[in-house]
Amino acid sequence: MVNSDLKEFYDNYHSNHLKFAVNEFPFRKAYWDSRISSFLPIDKSAAFLDLGCGNGDFLLYLKTLGYSNITGVEYSGEMKEISERSVTGIRIVQSDATAFLESSNQKFDFILCAHLLEHFEKNKVLDTFKLAKESLNPGGQFVVMTPNFASPFGIPIAFGDFTHLTHFSGPSMAQLAGLSDFGIRHIGGNGPVAFGFKGMLRSILWKNILKPIGKLVFSNNSRKYGNVVDPELIAVFLKNA
């Protein structure tokens, strides 16, 4: 099975998979604050690209922070329509992410690929990395977020979607950086979002009990970045000047 085999499913991805997800913006803002805020450019005129922009919540997040040079790319026609209703005044293109990078001559300072690459076969993942590097300005960042398939805590995310094709871990992210000639700014993990009482409780339990136990039991200390046991991976790659 390859990504193209699932076109009919992706055309209606919201109806088929995401309609029960928590998409309210206050929660999504807390999500992005905890994941991305420390990596965002200071320059409000920085050029952003969100590959697989989904319902548009990251585009809206950037807009509320005062950024304006923003482009979203979304393969699903249904999700693109939802994005356009969620955030106005932002360019959103319906396209395969890799095809967009291949055809575009625009340069960006920050490219986000959040929970997209796990839907690609491996050769397409590597192509996307190489094309993302070509599409960045010197000093630009390529930020990748995926389920952490190397951690048992990542199992609900990793195997919660039938369309996931490729598995990622901290060490495999470092491998991809080497294969595509990216510098590494950060490879780590994300735990529960501390939003609302339940989220705050889960976050406290994660940081103080579950994560330390997970590192003790499941870390692969023979590999760099093998001690990332969080359910979600985040990797920040740099295009050197």
Image: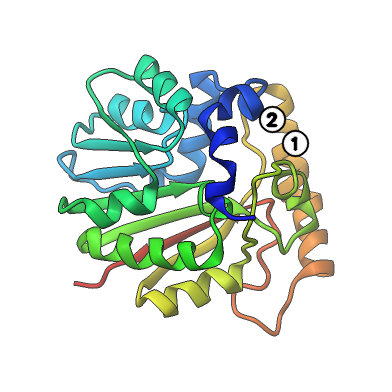
Could you tell me residue 110's position as x and y percent? 29, 51
Residue at 77% x, 52% y: name it: 153
In-front residue for pair 71/45: 71
The C terminus lies in quadrant = bottom left
Q: Secondary structure at mark 1?
A: helix
Q: Residue at x 51, y 30 (%)?
A: 11
Quadrant in which the N terminus is drawn: bottom right
Q: Are marks 2 and 1 in contact (CB under 8 Å)?
A: yes
State left or right for residue 150 relative to residue 130: right
Q: Residue at x 70, y 39 (%)?
A: 203
The part of the image, by quadrant, that contains residue 84 is top left
Which of the 4 quarters of the picture holds residue 185?
A: bottom left
Q: Which residue bears the numbered disc 2?
A: 199
Q: Where 110 sits versus 20, above or below?
A: below
Label 2 CA crowd tier, 10 Å (few <14, some 14–19, many 20+): some
As measured in the structure, the alpha-carbon distance from the residue carrying label 2 to the one carrying label 1 is: 5 Å
Label 1: how many Cα within 10 Å (few below 14, some 14–19, many 20+): some
Compared with 88, 54 (above or below) is below
Residue pictured at 33% horizontal, 52% vertical: 99
Number of numbered callouts drawn: 2
| Residue type indicated by callout 1 | Arg
User: Which numbered dot is residue 159?
Assistant: none
Q: Position of residue 131 (x, y in %)?
A: 31, 63
Amino acid type of disc 2? Gly
Circle 1 sits on which residue?
Answer: 202
Choose between 54 and 75: the one closer to the eye.
75
**Mark 2, secondary structure of its residue:** helix
Left or right of residue 206: residue 58: left
